[in-house]
Image: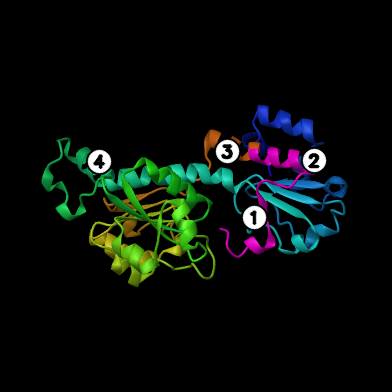
Amino acid sequence: MSPGLLDDVFPPHVRARLEETAELLDPSLISEFDSPAALRALARAEVLLTGWGCPAVDAGLWDRTPRLRAVIHAAGTVKTFLSPAAFDRGIVVSSAAAANAVPVAEFTLAAIIMGAKRVFPLAGLYRARRTHRTGADLDRQHWLGTHGLTVGVVGASRIGRRVIELLRVLDAEVLLYDPYVSTAEAELLGVTRTDLDTLVATSDVVTVHAPDTPETQGIIDARRIGLMRPGTLLVNTARGTLVDTEALTDHLVSGRLDAVLDVTAPEPLPVGHPLWDLPNVFLTPHLAGAQGNEVGRLGALAVDELTRYARGEPFAHPVHRADLGRIA
């Protein structure tokens, strides 16, 4: 984690707690594993605090870190840098994915509300015309609103579950597709468990929250996009690879569907891609996760976990080897 990012993730009040809990080694040294100073620091390290852009924690590090017992990631997924062999060495792992889920779910709720009210195309028309909207501004099949909305949630991940909680503020029926969730658990969540084809065919809004795994890549494929009713809103704040971008593009260009896409495949889209200019598509640059002062929430969770480790207590947000196949 770079010194600048360290200051963002651990603002002064959080860093003070961190310094009370543990001796901090210079993060600028750790960014270069092979320097003499880094080797001396790594030889003493018992816990690695990692974040976005950290070097790989894999076999190349084990000989340098004989005392390493824990990795606490002050960000979301650990799959991008952590070798599964860490678990074989008895290293315990924690992630701040639960903290990062908060702003993603909030963004998703905002996208659902704004998208269902057709804010994005109507705002574009308003900006272009400088006159009040009329009933003819959108085909009537595309008018939604939030009353009696049916929202299909794809994936009961941390984010998906938090979205389900936030949707309780709306007068909405929530459908869920997740092969790991039982009917009884779905009832506890207050949702109706269903298969994916039924979900996409009967929802007014489809919001994607599954992890990126070999099983989920392209899960919203051309056939399932074709099952969506005219006027359906697709929200994707998960991973672009879960949706067949080109198949979706055809339905968006025709105006049959609307979309709010914080992620795409590829990311970013090519400069000349039609989705950049469609009035019924709202593209954002993968910003649903922690931004600005939200990043401090990640650092606070990481320090809480470090405090638990120092006390000999189990992590509140552990990552287990068995989780790797199901997390983002």
Q: Is residue 36 left or right of residue 290?
A: right
Task: Residue type at mark 2: give it.
Answer: Ala
Q: How many marks?
A: 4
Measured as percent of width and height from the top left, residue 155 is found at 47, 59
Task: Residue type at mark 1: give it.
Answer: Val
The residue indicated by pointer 1 is: 78
Q: Is 6 in the magenta?
A: no
The circle on residue 310 is: 2
**Nearer the camera: disc 2 or disc 1:** 2
Task: Residue type at mark 4: give it.
Answer: Ala
The residue indicated by pointer 3 is: 295
Q: Residue at x 24, y 56 (%)?
A: 231
The residues bearing labels 2 and 1 have C-alpha atoms spaced at a distance of 21 Å
Neighbour tally class for label 3: few under 14, some 14-19, many 20 plus, Cα within 10 Å: many
The mark nearer the N terminus, 4 or 3, is: 4
Secondary-structure class at tag 2:
helix
Measured as percent of width and height from the top left, residue 173 is found at 33, 52
Q: Nearer the viewer, residue 198 or 289?
A: 198
Q: Which residues are magenta?
A: 301-328
Q: Is residue 101 left or right of residue 204?
A: right
Q: Residue at x 44, y 48 (%)?
A: 163
Task: Residue type at mark 3: give it.
Answer: Val
The residue indicated by pointer 4 is: 123
